[in-house]
């Protein structure tokens, strides 16, 4: 097991990752794109294991965006199969690592088979007290904010609350991530430097870390490097450092 350098004892509470580059990794090796997704599951195991060891509060993984439905149907079918397989095969590991599973995003476009495995894995991990493993599936930041706005508008229209009650805290409590700390560190693999409609509210003051490495080749040392860089950054949240 890789030891954790002292520098990274200043850990983020919540890490969010955009797992990008699966298809490009595969194509660079003359493999089908789906092989990149399959290999990416190994990296998921690596980072979830490390998050559990470090006792992070939350680890959120961008599995499928709302925009990903534009991809070829064969690739989407494989991604859903891979998700279902992951939930079955990793269920015991998630439980034994004291992790709790949460899903964020829409559920109305997911199959009954996937929803069933989600429910089973959440049930076996619901009493765990360690890292919360959050899988963002059919998720988009704008969609989440739109759904939240509609919900609060409906409550105001029905007389359940007044407009004056709508505060930042209430918005936070009305999002899919209610109860989680804001994202401290957002990592994106694959070389692109953008956030791709990911956790738009939650990353307001997150530290951003981009790496050219594709997700299937992102290893423990790479995760450690991101944590080390986070530990060395000064976070001011709009204020000034003492003495600045």
Image: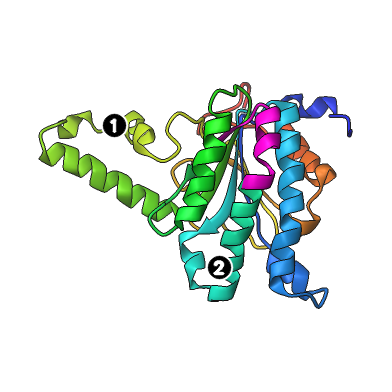
Residue 15, quarter of picture: top right
Q: Is residue 43 magenta?
A: no
- Relative placement, left or right, of 107 versus 190 is left
Query: Which one is in front, 128 or 151?
Result: 128
Choose between 201 and 111: the one closer to the eye.
111
Checking the image for residue 167, the label placed there is 1
Say whether residue 31 is visible: yes
Considering the numbered disc 1 on the image, is that residue within a helix, a strand or a loop?
A: loop
Q: Nearer the viewer, residue 163 or 157?
A: 157
Q: Is residue 96 left or right of residue 110?
A: right
Q: What span is colored magenta in the figure?
A: 88-101
Q: Are marks 2 and 1 in contact (CB under 8 Å)?
A: no
Q: How is the image coloured?
A: rainbow
Quarter of the image for the N terminus: give it.
Answer: top right
Specify whether 41 is left or right of 219. Answer: left
Mark 1, other Cα within 10 Å: few <14 / some 14–19 / many ≥20: few
Lateral position of residue 136 relative to residue 34, left or right: left
Find the distance from the CA under tag 2 to the CA under tag 1: 38 Å
Which secondary structure lies at badge 2? helix
Where residue 76 is drawn, which disc sits there?
2
Q: Residue at x 21, y 29 (%)?
A: 165
Is 32 placed above or below 227 here?
A: below
Quarter that holds the C terminus: top right
Residue 16, position as x, y percentages in the image: 60, 43
Residue 60 drawn at (x, y percent): 58, 42
């Amino acid at each position: 097991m890789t030891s954790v350098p002292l520098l990274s004892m200043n850990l983020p509470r919540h890490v969010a990752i955009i797992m990008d580059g699966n298809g490009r990794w595969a194509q660079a090796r003359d493999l089908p794109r789906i092989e990149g997704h399959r290999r990416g599951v190994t990296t998921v195991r690596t980072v979830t294991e490390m998050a559990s060891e470090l006792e992070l509060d939350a680890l959120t993984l961008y599995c499928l965006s709302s925009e990903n439905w534009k991809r070829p149907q064969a690739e989407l079918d494989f991604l859903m199969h891979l998700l279902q397989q992951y939930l079955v095969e990793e269920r015991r590991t998630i439980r034994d690592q004291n992790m709790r599973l949460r899903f964020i995003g829409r559920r109305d476009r997911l199959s009954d088979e996937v929803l069933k495995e989600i429910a089973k894995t959440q049930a076996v991990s619901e009493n765990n007290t360690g890292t919360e493993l959050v899988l963002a599936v059919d998720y988009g930041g704008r969609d989440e904010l739109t759904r939240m706005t509609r919900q609060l508008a409906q409550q105001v229209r029905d007389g359940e609350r007044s407009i004056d009650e709508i505060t930042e805290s209430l918005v936070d409590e009305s999002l899919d991530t209610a109860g989680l700390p804001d994202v401290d560190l957002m990592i994106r693999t694959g070389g692109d430097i953008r956030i791709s409609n990911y956790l738009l509210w939650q990353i307001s003051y997150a530290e951003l870390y981009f790496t050219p490495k594709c997700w299937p080749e992102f290893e423990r040392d790479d995760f450690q490097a991101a944590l080390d860089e986070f530990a060395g950054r000064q976070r001011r949240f709009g204020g000034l450092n003492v003495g600045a």
